[in-house]
Image (tube, rainbow, N blue to C red):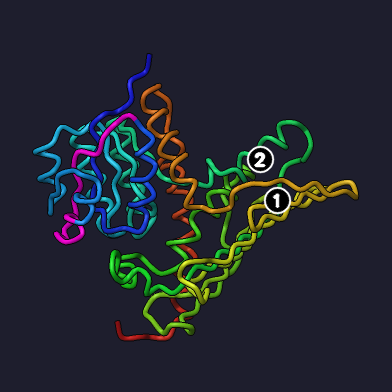
């Protein structure tokens, strides 16, 4: 019988996904024993909310607490050091994407994790989404063939919504960029997963014209692969409602087309349409991710996604950033 981790820590909790992971942990047998954040106000807030101890330095937490598993967050540029500290402590963990500000950052963590045979999970939550699982099931049943082309549009609210809990995300040096590194990585990973090929950059356009910040607030990127497939990604902080976002996805294969939005997938094939209900609220995927991650650890299986998967994604992000940043006017931060 597999035993799941009982003592769980949350590292550098000044992050927008902290609450989603914490909510997912409510369904698990383990308990959150401690949280950390260098901002003491944020650490105290989450400690009071979760009923656990607070630390202003995650290294002190790792020294003082008995931790079976950690969910780590943090500013993007700090993530490699957090990951390396957890690996050195021998603690299995999940750490938020993008695990740094470049592919080189992720590659170094991957090297160390491989040497130490560490369990390192990356929350590519679309892998456990109803969308991904439905497409994989339909293909396994022979109802659709392999996907060729994809389009993902994900337009979130103003970046100012990060200002209280994660103000660093508005600083390109600390975040590694703007909306593209923050929002697109799930879609790049999904394109790789569903096609089985690592893509190359075909073109991109970054803009910061809506909010006038140093980061891009809108990005359109086109990817392609060796078999002729393509993936168009549009992401941004441009939706005029911070409590909602606009999401629309499409996936194309030979003789079939799927469109996904508003909790519905419409599959067109052979002159007919089938309608499927599925949850497109990405926040709901995190509870499933927590469940699958702790289950994988307990059963000795690889995580949902690892640094090797993230490294492929970040190579694409690096290329897009190199080209896209040249298109942004200089703005004083």
Picture quarter with the N terminus:
top left
Residue 133, quarter of the rendered image: top right
Question: In the image, is 66 to the left or to the right of 155?
Answer: left
**Residue behind mark 1:** 265
Residue closer to the observer: 226 or 192:
192
Residue 3 locus on image (x, y percent):
33, 20
Question: In the image, is 97 to the left or to the right of 231?
Answer: left
Q: Residue at x 46, y 75 (%)?
A: 217
Residue 140, quarter of the rendered image: top right
Residue 329, quarter of the rendered image: bottom left
**Residue behind mark 2:** 134
Residue range highlighted in magenta = 29-44
Q: Residue at x 42, y 34 (%)?
A: 291
Residue 49 lies in the magenta stretch: no
Residue 181 locus on image (x, y percent):
43, 62
Label annotation for residue 192:
none
Q: Residues within 10 Å of mark 1 (few under 14, many from 20)?
A: many
Decide: is 85 above or below 141.
Answer: below
Decide: is 103 above or below 88.
Answer: below
Determine the residue located farthest toward the top in the rendered image.
Answer: 1
**Do the numbered discs 1 and 2 sit on residues whose CB atoms are within 8 Å?**
yes
Residue closer to the observer: 290 or 77:
290
Task: Check disc 1 and report its element: helix, strand or loop.
Answer: strand
Picture quarter with the C terminus:
bottom left
Determine the residue located farthest toward the right in the rendered image.
Answer: 271
Residue 250 locus on image (x, y percent):
69, 56
Query: How much space separates mark 1 and mark 2, taking CA atoms?
Result: 10 Å
Of the numbered discs 1 and 2, the one sitting upstream in the chain is 2
Residue 86 locus on image (x, y percent):
22, 40
């Amino acid at each position: 019988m597999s035993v799941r981790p009982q003592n769980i820590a949350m590292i550098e909790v000044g992050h927008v996904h902290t609450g989603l992971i914490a909510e997912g942990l409510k369904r698990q047998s383990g308990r959150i024993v401690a949280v950390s954040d260098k901002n003491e106000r944020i650490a105290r807030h989450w400690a009071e909310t979760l009923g656990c101890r607070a630390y202003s330095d995650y290294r002190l937490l790792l020294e003082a607490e008995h931790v079976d598993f950690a969910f780590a967050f943090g500013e993007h540029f700090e993530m490699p050091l957090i990951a390396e500290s957890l690996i050195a402590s021998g603690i299995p963990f999940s750490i938020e994407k993008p695990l740094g500000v470049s592919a080189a950052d992720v590659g170094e963590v991957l090297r160390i994790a491989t040497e130490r045979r560490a369990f390192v999970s990356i929350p590519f939550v679309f892998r456990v989404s109803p969308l991904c699982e439905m497409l994989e099931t339909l293909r396994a049943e022979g109802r659709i063939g392999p996907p060729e082309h994809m389009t993902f549009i994900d337009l979130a609210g103003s970046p100012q919504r990060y200002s209280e809990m994660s103000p660093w995300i508005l600083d390109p040096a600390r975040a590694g960029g703007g909306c593209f590194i923050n929002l697109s990585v799930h879609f790049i990973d999904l394109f790789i997963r569903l096609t089985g090929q690592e893509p190359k950059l075909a073109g991109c356009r970054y803009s910061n014209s809506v909010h006038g910040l140093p980061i891009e607030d809108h990005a359109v990127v086109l990817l392609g692969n060796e078999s002729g497939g393509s993936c168009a990604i549009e992401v941004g902080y441009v939706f005029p409602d911070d409590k909602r976002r606009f999401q629309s996805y499409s996936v194309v294969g030979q003789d079939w087309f799927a469109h996904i939005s508003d909790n519905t997938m419409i599959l067109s094939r052979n002159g007919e349409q089938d309608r499927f209900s599925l949850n497109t609220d990405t926040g709901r995927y995190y509870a499933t991710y927590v469940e699958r991650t702790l289950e994988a650890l307990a059963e000795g299986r690889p995580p949902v996604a690892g640094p090797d998967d993230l490294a492929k994604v970040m190579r694409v992000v690096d290329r897009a950033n190199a080209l896209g940043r040249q298109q942004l006017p200089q703005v004083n931060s």
